[in-house]
Amino acid sequence: MVKRQTSAVDRYLDLPYHITLVQDGEENGGKWIAAAEELPDCTSRADTAEEAIAGLKGAMAAWITVALKEGRDIPEPRSEATPSGRLLLRMPRTLHAALTKAAERENVSLNQFITDSLASVVGWRRGPTAAEASTQAPINQEPGAGGLTAAPLSSSPRPAQPRRSWRVRPQLLTAALTANFVLVAIAGTIAILVLIAARP
């Protein structure tokens, strides 16, 4: 029985599970965390990336062994063509603070604000045509892991979307500031020339 279970564990360990490797912030000593994406809470933490990955192999074997003993289903690796919907992103603290403030102004979660912003940049989720609207389920963008899923069709009206703030493209803002600077410089030059000409 033990040999059969060991071979089952080895068979699962040979599958191409997706591994996420991230370095925790410097304030926590810069530890590396490796996780098997398809196996919930299966992680390994170490001082180096290599040690974290090596430790994850043992953590996966233990996770699969317990699941087999308890008769739980063991997820198989997802297809490469199927995105997980999760994204680990590192950014400067100042950008994080600016995004947080913008999300608070919109009265939405930071996750939803970033998702909406990225979607608008790539033109994703444009409004459906009239024909599609009658058959397409509305998208649920509630904060949390269950968000961004198709809500069941019902006769109840869709909730009002949060009002978007007015956004200016960086290129337009730069052009407007440059034009403003040029106008101020011209006005200043004219004022100086008038003062010089007016001197007795």
Image (spheres, grey):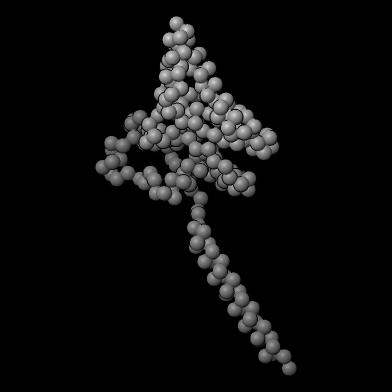
Pick the front one: 176 or 55: 55
In the image, is 121 to the left or to the right of 56? Answer: left
Residue occupying image coordinates x 72% and y 90%: 199
Pick the front one: 125 or 34: 34
Residue occupying image coordinates x 47% and y 7%: 2
- The x and y percentages for residue 158 are 39, 37
Q: Is residue 130 visible?
A: yes
Residue occupying image coordinates x 43% and y 24%: 14
Tell me the quarter of the image containing the N terminus.
Answer: top left
Tell me the quarter of the image containing the C terminus.
Answer: bottom right
- The x and y percentages for residue 77 are 41, 27
Image vertical order of residue 59 relative to residue 79, above or below: above
In the picture as drawn, the residue positioned furthest to the right comes out as 200
In the picture as drawn, the residue positioned furthest to the top comes out as 1
Residue occupying image coordinates x 46% and y 31%: 18
- The x and y percentages for residue 81 are 37, 36
In the picture as drawn, the residue positioned furthest to the left comes out as 131
Pick the front one: 97 or 102: 97
Q: Can residue 104 be seen in this view?
A: no
Image vertical order of residue 171 relative to residue 105, above or below: below
- The x and y percentages for residue 56 are 54, 25
Pick the front one: 52 or 42: 52
Q: Quadrant of residue 51?
A: top right
